[in-house]
Image: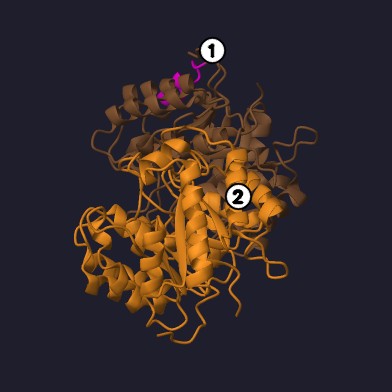
Chain colours: A orange, B brown
Amino acid sequence: MQAAVHLCEVGPRDGLQAVSRTMPTADKTAWLKALHAAGLRHMEVASFVPARLLPQMADAAEVVAHALTLPGLKVQALAPNLKGVQAAAAAGAQVVSVPLSASEAHANANLRKTIAQAVEEFRHIVAWRNEMAPALQLEAGISVAFGCSMQGAVPEDDVIRLAHTLAQAGADVVGVADTTGMANPAQVRRMYRSLFAELGNADDEGRPGKTGGAHVHNTRGLGLANCLAAYDVGVRSFDASMAGLGGCPYAPGASGNVVTEDLVFMFEAMGLHTGINLDRLMAARAPLAAGLPGEPLYGMTPEAGVPKGFMPTTAMQGPST
Amino acid sequence: MQAAVHLCEVGPRDGLQAVSRTMPTADKTAWLKALHAAGLRHMEVASFVPARLLPQMADAAEVVAHALTLPGLKVQALAPNLKGVQAAAAAGAQVVSVPLSASEAHANANLRKTIAQAVEEFRHIVAWRNEMAPALQLEAGISVAFGCSMQGAVPEDDVIRLAHTLAQAGADVVGVADTTGMANPAQVRRMYRSLFAELGNADDEGRPGKTGGAHVHNTRGLGLANCLAAYDVGVRSFDASMAGLGGCPYAPGASGNVVTEDLVFMFEAMGLHTGINLDRLMAARAPLAAGLPGEPLYGMTPEAGVPKGFMPTTAMQGPST
């Protein structure tokens, strides 16, 4: 059965880098294996940044190498600059996501660059990729696209203009992220309609464009509603994080990314095939918990269990390994 | 400004009856006053059931009497049978919601009746109302309409048939409830489209029908997504519970009703006027907490705070008292 929606598990990157302790490499690889066994075929597994800044990601190359042993897995990493992209490519990452910001305040805080400087860096990355690693897929990820904790509201026009610039600069895919959980469903629909009009939809099979999947945080509880809104207007790829790991330093105590388990439950309950087996997905929380003892794991569906009589579209799959 | 969506706060009934301790009457009335000051103009404030079954609701008549002093408040109570409806009417409730079940298993567990017996009881209630209390509005509330913890899936046809029967029997409004948090957005849209086709929409100003607002639980985290789905197809009234109080005995640990604070934030962020001031709504958590010390209060927006630069439609209102 063809998947109706595609999920990218970003917990190993977005989640683990938000947790202060460092998950041992062996636990990371056990977790990736369990996620893969549940049916996930796209994961952002590591961030290529200096280990002194993010010690949680010091084993990025090793984790990518392990991820590459999992059959059929699209292995994605994050890298904020050319040096990081080169390291990710050297490690074997098939997709590298490069973060930029829709607000100057966030660009400065997160990247120590102006937006213009970040775009310039992205052009260097594309030039290097074109010459040295033509098979490498480059995704430009626009952070705080739906609002910024420092700047406040972010005009949609700013996002669309930046997305257009990055697509023209050579990004294969341009994604927008609700980094701080400020998006609402009406805004999500407007944003994706505008992006699709400008860049097309990467998931449009007939005429693929460049707009990437949705990346939303659940900071104010709207994560699933925003994913539904995105789905309604044609988004078919979604980032999510097991147990809602992740988060935003500007919203203390708030949970992070939209919870993979809840998102899979929502889509499967709607009859939309995800290719992800919910029982095995729940089982993949165990290696995560083992690697981060005492870390709170979020998720409403794991807590309540699937409803009696629940008929997922992905129940009938044979065993996946 | 005309409200684009109408919220009914059900925490004082659905929430407090799910909490094992009893909130003192003075704390209940202080809480109702704070909710009213935030702009809520419709509340289900009590349940008229024998005090030996629900000691939390022993002061129902007193709470209704207080609620009637709050200007412009539509005062609703719940009552499972004729005796309860009579008591609610005597206390002055303007609307009484009568619960029925879409599954025999739940009807038996919750009401100790078959569905047919519950419908028969409802006919007696209507007959009494018509003769003795013609101004009393009667809402029939169909529990477990989206799935039952005991029966499992509930066929939509069963719900529509029961809704039709109850409307014919004389219900002013027929509401469907996702009592156990099993609904998904696709199902919600199908259900309301069918109900509107059969009964019309009570919130349709041009041609008001009998389908009531949405009552969903957040057991699996889909509460807001399901409300969004309902809104999309024309639902304009929503039950919600401050701090997510409520819950379902068949999903231990899971939170209860959709959280009023999060729902108001979602709608206001979408530019839909609720008439509810978020700051004052947040402030109404204090009297709730005071009346139920130590009880966990849920809600993502209260935890994270409203985003910087947030412009609610209901900010401009003058002081309400």
- Residue carrying label 1: B318
Q: Position of residue B316 (x, y in %)?
A: 55, 17
Nearer the observer, A203 or A289: A203
Q: Secondary structure at mark 1?
A: loop
Q: Is residue B307 above or below residue A140?
A: above
Nearer the observer, A214 or A76: A76
Which quadrant does the N terminus of chain B fall into?
top right
**Residue drawn at (55%, 74%), measured in percent from left and top?**
A313
Crowding around mark 2 (Cα neighbors within 10 Å: few <14, some 14 to 19, many 20+) is some
What is the three-letter code of the residue carrying label 1? Gly
Chain where mark 2 sits: A
Q: Do the dots labelled 1 and 2 sit on one chain?
A: no
**Residue drawn at (66%, 42%), measured in percent from left and top?**
B235
Q: Is residue A266 above or below residue B88?
A: below
- Residue carrying label 2: A165
Q: Position of residue A285 (x, y in %)?
A: 31, 67
Give the magenta-colored segment's residue range. B62-70
What is the three-letter code of the residue carrying label 2? Thr
Q: Position of residue B62 (x, y in %)?
A: 41, 23
Quarter of the view holding residue A244: bottom left
Q: Secondary structure at mark 2?
A: helix
